[in-house]
Image (cartoon, rainbow, N blue to C red):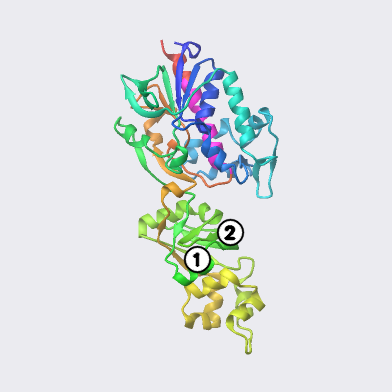
Amino acid sequence: MSTKNSRVAVIGGGPAGLMAAQALAEGGAQVDLYDAMPSVGRKFLLAGRGGMNITHAEPYADFVTRYGARAAALRPMLDAFGPDQVRAWVAALGVDTFVGSSGRVFPTDMKAAPLLRAWLHRLREAGVGFHMRHRWLGWRENLPLFATPDGALTAPADAIVLALGGGSWARLGSDGAWLPLLQAEGVPVAPLEPANCGFDVAWSAHFSSRYAGHPLPTVAIRARDGAGNETRKQGQFVVTAGGVEGSLIYALSAALREQVKADGSALIHLDLLPDWSAARVMDEVCRPRGARSMASHLQSRLGLKGVKSGLLRECLSAQEFADPARLAQAIKLLPLRLCRARPIDEAISSAGGVRFEGLDKLMLQARPGVFVAGEMLDWEAPTGGYLLTACLASGLAAGASARAWLDARP
């Protein structure tokens, strides 16, 4: 059987599923794409609401390391469809891109909708059929089974690509309901966990009510992962009513999550003035302040005020705050304990999923002819274009593997 004589079901209408459908349609397969939602690409569109971050322009050797323990497994897919190829593909859809000051790559209009419209137009021209409100339920007589507005039905398929997303943002379709279905088939899976997520902190009622929603600009965090390895990152995050969230927290979320799992909580240390040396901070704090309060002294000499000053009050005792030497040390190394990760449905993405050890070129060893792509796979990455790039790359790889498998069948 060749790809051109085959019918393939792609289940899941996010970036990975759409890319798998593109690869299969370009190979001549009749492709049917199924999704539980009324329309495709809902999480893709939401991610682009504040500016569609497509990929990242940092050196490729550094780019690959952002996938941590799964970098080696993803490397062949990223080699075939990495940041440069993503930008070329976007350009071929008629969308120009630019590199922001942080190295992140965006469409010139910063929007996701025009890119998705152009992509869907191309897929329809290639013959891809779209079937909405079809929720995958597993198999019946080796055919994919769906719940639809017209009742349960099976769909013809010589091969299947599963691209059902992870476990975050269930209202947009990524609810992780597929995991027990695959477990029942003997597929090895890792539990789904929150990634790029916030964490709870036991704030006092006073601090929470006064500073919830306040951003912390230009700070650094030192943290350890479950294995005890220390990391330090600089950036920004936001205080919430019950904890912390934002880009700097998300960048460390994997290490923090593992520390919580290992120790029951995660201890981080904040550097409130990362561009100042410890000696300079000590010198300024210890200068005579006369009749001024310590809070006024900190604002005058170090520019510390607002939520940063509030954090010092929150995390130090009155005696420590009044001790210049102890206070200066805390400004550069303020301990803050994180109680737990926020629920997975609040997370930007999820970790866990189908283990690579149960796959052969993205095909389930327990289910020949069934391929897996995107966030269903057991990997995670920080925000910054890494998530989308790997979803696209794995979708393309799953589609290519399905084509090769179909072509090799008698």
Give yes or no for residue 81 being in the magenta stretch: no
Q: Position of residue 223 (x, y in %)?
A: 48, 60
* Residue 408 appears in the rendering: yes
Residue occupying the far front of the picture: 150
Task: Report the disc number at residue 269.
Answer: 1
The residues colored magenta run: 385-402
* Closer to us: 209 or 160: 209
Q: Total marks drawn?
A: 2
Task: Report the disc number at residue 236.
Answer: 2
Q: Is residue 262 above or below residue 119?
A: below
Badge 1 density bin: few <14, some 14–19, many ≥20, Cα 10 Å? some
Q: Position of residue 67 (x, y in %)?
A: 51, 43
- Name the chief secondary structure element in magenta: helix
Q: Counting residues from the N terminus, which is met first, the one under dot 2 or under dot 1?
A: 2
Judge depth for marks 2 and 1 and give the one in front.
2
Give the amino acid at mark 1: His
Residue shown at 66% from the left, 28% from the top? 93
